[in-house]
Amino acid sequence: MKFRELRADEIECRIGQIGKNGNGLSLLLYKTARCDMDLLDEVVGPENWQREHYECKGNLFCRVGINTNYNVPESVNWVYKSDCGSESNTEKEKGEASDSFKRACVNWGIGRELYTAPFIWVTDCKIENSKCHDKFVVSNISYKDSKITELTIKNEKTGNVVFEMNKISNNKKKEAVNDIICTKCGKPIMMLTGKDNKLYSAGEVAKLCKGMCKECYEVTKNERKNTVPKYIP
């Protein structure tokens, strides 16, 4: 069983981080629980899937069951996959239930391709008092082998393209139309050559370093006494 990749209109954008100096923000791509339900209905039919929530060691889990014989008349074979959720900042219980359902659906492969998204840094936005009320939408997205190869995001209010990633001949990812800025020091993130002699683009560095340049990431890492992953260039 394979679920199709999500269309642009099925993907939502939310703000991940706002730059320390208000010089931009990062965006994260996600899907809603309604999107999961619609796709389950579309592929297997509303009568061939079910969900159940349960608690385990203080965490709320969701189990999504699918009748994998949905295309065989009068044949039933229920298979279940589950995952736990985290509380939202608004409605605690509802947010946790919704999150666990969405994560369980990822285990079935729904929206898993969103995890291949590049680091998305936007400067064409209005930030006041470290807050931004602009809404951003995905206007175009393409995939190859379940990985994002093209992505265009617009500011819904202005209609401007604020981020664009295109597929080019050597299958490398082209950087955004704007510089990718470190969320800590406010300076542009540069390409780096890793210990494995691989060239990491600014977008790849930002994604691996959680929105920061390598220098700021290492400072933060030392402050938190964490270990830098081996794949950080």
Image (cartoon, helix red, strand yellow):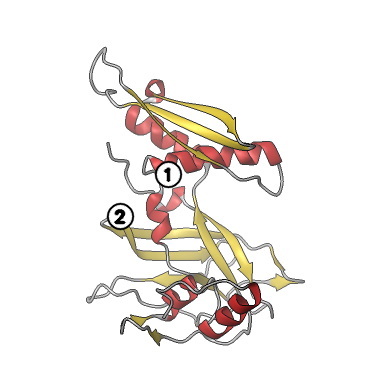
Q: Residue at x 25, y 72 (%)?
A: 171
Residue 195: percent from the left, percent from the top?
Answer: 36, 83
Q: Is residue 205 visible?
A: yes
* Image position, residue 114 (x, y; %): 42, 55
* Viewer-side label of 2, 1: 1
Q: Quadrant of residue 124?
A: bottom right
Q: Quadrant of the N terminus?
A: top left
Left or right of 106 on screen, residue 183: right
The Cα–Cα distance between marks 2 and 1, rounded to whole angstroms, is 13 Å
Residue drawn at point x = 42 percent, y = 57 percent: 115
Residue at the (45%, 47%) spot, across then down:
10
* Residue sticking out furthest to the top: 74
Q: Percent from the top left, x then y, of residue 91?
A: 70, 41
Identify the image quadrant of residue 95: top right
Identify residue type, mark 1: Val
Please state which amino acid type lies under the numbered disc 2.
Ser
Q: Of 131 and 102, which appears nearest the observer?
A: 102
Circle 1 Cα neighbour tier, 10 Å, few/some/many (<14 / 14–19 / ≥20): some
Q: Is residue 49 above or below residue 96?
A: above
Which mark, by number, is residue 146? 2
